[in-house]
Amino acid sequence: MKDQIKKHSKFLSLLLRHKPETVGLKLDEQGWADTNELLLKINQTGRQVSFELLDKIVEENDKKRFVFNEDKSRIRAAQGHSLNVNLDYKPITPPDILYHGTIAKTAELIQISGIKKMQRHQVHLSADTETAKIVGARRGKPVILTVDAQRMHKDGYKFFQSDNGVWLTDFVPSEYVQHL
């Protein structure tokens, strides 16, 4: 069952973060999809996803990637979009230090050119080293970088926090980044 949930979660990420057109799904400007339409479109691909299974995927996802609205009639990805969506997060004051998990090769480039959003909507940062380590380990041996978020904030950079606790900003210049 756990493998099945992971498989469906990855497909859900594809649809709600990157390519809703894969199944003909429409997202609104804030990235919301109608829950019933999503289930219909997923099931038309031959997958068997009930509302109960979708609810379980949302609740049990270790990174809390997905959120429902209050009555669960709509669903969206909390962050990580490559699509142009307006998540309507308000700027907030970050903690003094945030963390970014990567690999050695990328860390060297970051020291020169900063942390870029690349194909994503924004740069993802975490409030703890353990999360950063997990993120970095997806591509190899993790390297944890510290970001002087408070100094960035004082220098005018905006920070946001997604529904699942991920810290977001548009760019982190290299002068704010250090190896842990």
Image (cartoon, rainbow, N blue to C red):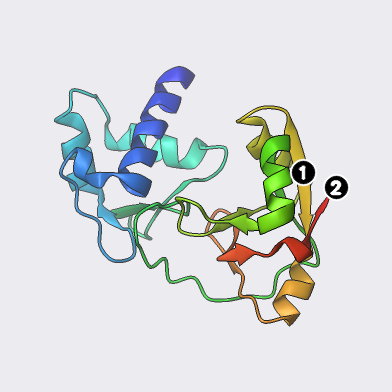
User: Residue 172 appears in which quarter of the rendering?
Assistant: bottom right
Task: Name which quarter of the figure residue 88 lies in.
Answer: bottom left
Q: Quote the CA–CA distance across marks 1 and 2.
A: 6 Å
Q: Residue at x 60, y 64 (%)?
A: 171
Residue 180, label in figure: 2
Q: Residues within 10 Å of mark 2 (few under 14, many from 20)?
A: few
Q: Is residue 1 visible to us here?
A: no
Q: What's under tag 2, amino acid-wise?
A: Leu
Looking at the image, which is closer to me, 20 or 175? 175
Q: Secondary structure at mark 1?
A: strand
Whether residues under marks 1 and 2 lie with C-beta atoms below 8 angstroms apart, the answer is yes
Q: Earlier in the sequence, mark 1 or mark 2?
A: 1
For image coordinates 34% across by 55% down, the residue present is 83
Q: What residue is drawn where x is 45% and y is 18%? A: 3
Say left or right for 71 vs 78.
left
Position of residue 72 measured from the top left corner of the image (x, y, whole percent): 33, 53
In x, y percent, where is residue 89? Answer: 49, 70
Q: Which numbered circle lies on residue 144?
A: 1
Q: Is residue 162 left or right of residue 111?
A: left
> In the image, what residue type sits under mark 1?
Ile
Mark 1 closeness class: few <14, some 14–19, many ≥20 residues within 10 Å: many
Examine the image and state in which quarter residue 168 appears: bottom right
Q: Secondary structure beneath disc 2?
A: loop
Q: What percent of the width, then of the height, locates residue 78?
A: 46, 54
